[in-house]
Amino acid sequence: MADMPTPCLPAEEFQHRLLTWFDKHGRHDLPWQSPRSAYRVWVSEIMLQQTQVATVIPYFERFMSRFPTLEALATAPQDDVLHHWTGLGYYARARNLHKAAQVAMEEHGGELPTESVETLMALPGIGRSTAGAIIAQSTGRQAAILDGNVKRSLTRLHAVAGWPGKPAVERSLWALAEYFTPTTRLADYTQAMMDFGAMLCKRSNPDCSICPFSDVCRAYAQGEPQRYPVSKPKKATPTRETIMLMLRDPQGRVWLEQRPPSGLWGGLWSLPQFERHSELNDWLEDNTKAPERHAALPSFTHTFSHFKLVITPQPVTCERISGVRESGVWYDVNHPPALGLAAPVKSLLSQLAPLTLDPTPGRPSY
């Protein structure tokens, strides 16, 4: 605890104030709270990374309907898992979720190893805070969390200087998180910490006037709570460009290819991509019969966490395709198969389809 700032309150008083607020104002009817299990909490925690609760709820419910157990997830094809993740983004989360379920089946008897934070962290995609949330909410044992909401709240309450991503700052926040974590009502306390950051100590416009900690909040006392936490040092966001081939056959189906397992849109199905029109022309000459180019569609920008991608869709029709059949499928936009699609690809395909792209299972044609 040597790196811990002086706590704003004794732990028991902090817990009392927080849980009193939570009992009256917190979220008690989230779908992963009932029934509550390690598997359901785990899936929700992974979905909630970088994504707000309101967005996650319908995805969670569809995911649970299709993969109600860890075994169902572990034995499902990756395409099916990615299909049910389409639209949530950050697809490495889904790949790691699938991989971790398989490891749990093979090495832990089909259960998540909730014996300790360390055993959970050995699974793909589970970090320290996620592991703590799973243990606290599903077993009731003491385990601290430090997600983005908690970092923001603790940073403001204690006016912690420096970007929370710096190791020294993060250590001090973990020390505070562990100090305040109780030994009882762990599920409620954990949800309360997340709700407090999401509902009161918000990133912008925090509701300080109704905060149960306003009398001890050091950032509020300084008159500038939004100054905390310090933002990550900014770097210039690079821009890349790509041409997406929208190749259609006489039946109106669209040619899709599966991305490599890792990297951008790893494992998802996408339109073929080219850096230059000359590369696209060579591909068409080698792999299609009687290709006919049409006017390019307007370019648009898709933003990732670390760069921007300018996409130019290029429609082409052809009689048939040859040479690359093993690497792709003909996708029927009117009866879409259950494939995981990159978000901009789903958007482009939806413009071609009179019907929805939500699962109305068809079968891809190879």
Image (cartoon, rainbow, N blue to C red):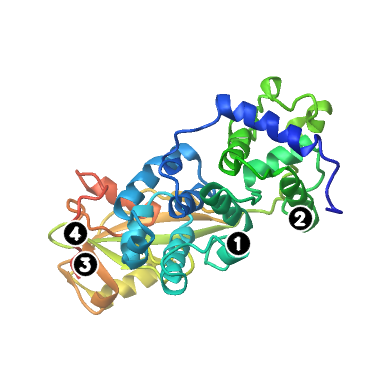
Q: Residue at x 77, y 35 (%)?
A: 157
The three-letter amino acid code for the residue at tag 2 is: Lys
Q: Residues within 10 Å of mark 3 (few under 14, many from 20)?
A: some
> Is any atom of residue 208 visible in this view?
yes
The location of residue 55, given as percent across then percent down, is 44, 40
Asked whether, in this view, residue 7 is left or right of residue 269, the answer is right
Real-space Cα separation, disc 2 to disc 3, in angstroms: 54 Å
The nearer-to-camera label among 4 and 3 is 4
Labels 2 & 3 near each other (Cβ < 8 A) = no
Real-space Cα separation, disc 1 to disc 3, in angstroms: 58 Å
Q: Quadrant of the C terminus?
A: bottom left
Q: Earlier in the sequence, mark 4 or mark 1?
A: 1
User: Which mark is on residue 166?
Assistant: 2
Real-space Cα separation, disc 4 to disc 2, in angstroms: 49 Å
Labels 1 & 3 near each other (Cβ < 8 A) = no
Residue underneath mark 3: 291
> Is any atom of residue 347 visible in this view?
no
Asked whether, in this view, residue 265 is left or right of residue 206, the answer is left
The nearer-to-camera label among 4 and 2 is 2
The three-letter amino acid code for the residue at tag 1 is: Ser
Real-space Cα separation, disc 4 to disc 3, in angstroms: 14 Å
Labels 4 & 3 near each other (Cβ < 8 A) = no
Residue 306 figure quarter: bottom right
Q: Residues within 10 Å of mark 4 (few under 14, many from 20)?
A: many
Labels 1 & 2 near each other (Cβ < 8 A) = no
Please tell me whether mark 2 sits on a helix, a strand or a loop: loop
Residue underneath mark 1: 116
Q: Residue at x 18, y 62 (%)?
A: 363
